[in-house]
Image (cartoon, helix red, strand yellow):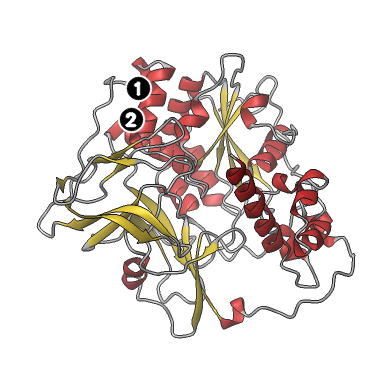
Amino acid sequence: MSNFFSLGRLFSLGNSFSHGVHPRHHKEQTENLPIQRVPFVSRYIMPLGQHIGVPAEPIVKVGDVVQRGELIARPKGFISTALHSPVTGKISDIGMHRYVDGSFKMAIEIAADPYATQQFIKIQTNSTNVRDMDIAEFIDAVQMSGIVGMGGAAFPSHVKYAIPDEQQITDLLVNGAECEPYLTNDHRLMVERPEAVLRGSEILRRQLGADRVAIGVEKNKPESITQLKKYLTTDMAIDIVPLEVKYPQGAEKMLIKSIYNKELPAGKLPRDIGIAVNNVGTIVALADYFDHGMPLIERIVTLAGPGVHEPANLIVPIGTPIRDVLDFAGGLKEQTREVISGGPMMGTPIADLDAPILKGTSGILAFTENETSRPREYPCIRCARCLEACPYFLNPSRLALLGKARLFTEMQDKYHVMDCVECGACTYACPSNIPIVQHIRTAKDNLRNRKAESH
């Protein structure tokens, strides 16, 4: 039995973070559906910038034959990561292709070989055993694996593991909360591959020098909790921590508060208080890479929503056109009006169904007129429900008013708009149907653009 109340880590059982909301979880569509694999299709689009940071640099040219798992773009700087071919085939184009948001970005297009077995090439690391690696070798290996944060942010994972000498990681926190409605890809991963979750957790814990691992799972996923505990052995420094069901439980600050009862100060990173946070999908990707030599060339995607004929949890090669994934599941219903990437609270509308599945694509959700028709917006009645909902203790109603007036500098200087993670809890709670988070996103984009232009 693991030491749940280990020294200095008295987990706040039954507690949670302040504020937040309780949307219907809508997970019944797919929570009991086993993961299945999407067949290979004829073409794949691999954007070079599908991670936060500097886009990767192509090392192939049009006409080259590539194998599944082969490196096709190398990192261009430290905050950048590698890109590998998801399929055996031929490079058919390197140019501008549509992204999920409708913009055009540089990408590598690959025409699949219809006669290939599609076995992936194992990556050879500098060491035959991850136990023999020092932290510098580990970080280099993770960068070349192409692994990023799989919860949606797609931040290059190796950057998180580069801990300054003056800091020490004492706790590894694995995020299995999956608090977004509809999404069940992390849940099915914990149910079907618990050994990989535990294995990846132990690999990363040893490399970071952490004392223990806490895997946080919301209580509406009892099968995940049961499966992880079933495969947990006494020699693993891992605790499975059931969490209250609340949104946004999966945000780093909220998880840290719920599990360790620690406040992460504004502007600080989890490592500043001795904690490293990783999504459960990232942890499994680490296990697959170091145990089997498989780079990040595929991921699990939840396909759900009222507009989908056949909801599913799917293993999808990265770069697969979204339209092909939808076709595999019977296509969209006639009354579908909007398709989004990610969850309904933080996801983004898909502008082009021929855009590809990315490393950070956790779900594809289709909604009908009933869910997408925008209700009439009324003036703010100053009810303060958005303040009660905001887990970051911001003033969403004031931010929305300033955003409408385009007073973006005041939003930043006086009301800390950049601290907002755009979870959407404020918009969900607003009885006047004010699109608060959309005003905040517009302001943050404007401020980022101004900063970029000034440099």
Considering every residue shown, the one lying at the far bottom of the view is 334
Q: Which residue is mark 2?
A: 290
Rendered residue at 44%/74% (across/down)? 308
Q: Residues within 10 Å of mark 2 (few under 14, many from 20)?
A: many
Q: Position of residue 373 (x, y in %)?
A: 63, 80
Q: Which residue is mark 1?
A: 130
Is 122 left or right of 46, judged from the image as shown? Answer: left
Q: Position of residue 46 (x, y in %)?
A: 32, 52
Q: Position of residue 142 (x, y in %)?
A: 38, 31
Q: Position of residue 11 (x, y in %)?
A: 70, 32
Q: Secondary structure at mark 1?
A: helix
- Labelled disc at residue 268: none
Q: Amino acid at mark 2?
A: Phe
Q: Amino acid at mark 1?
A: Val
Q: Is residue 338 above or below residue 317?
A: below
Along the line of sight, the residue nearer the viewer: 380 or 179: 380
Considering every residue shown, the one lying at the far front of the view is 454
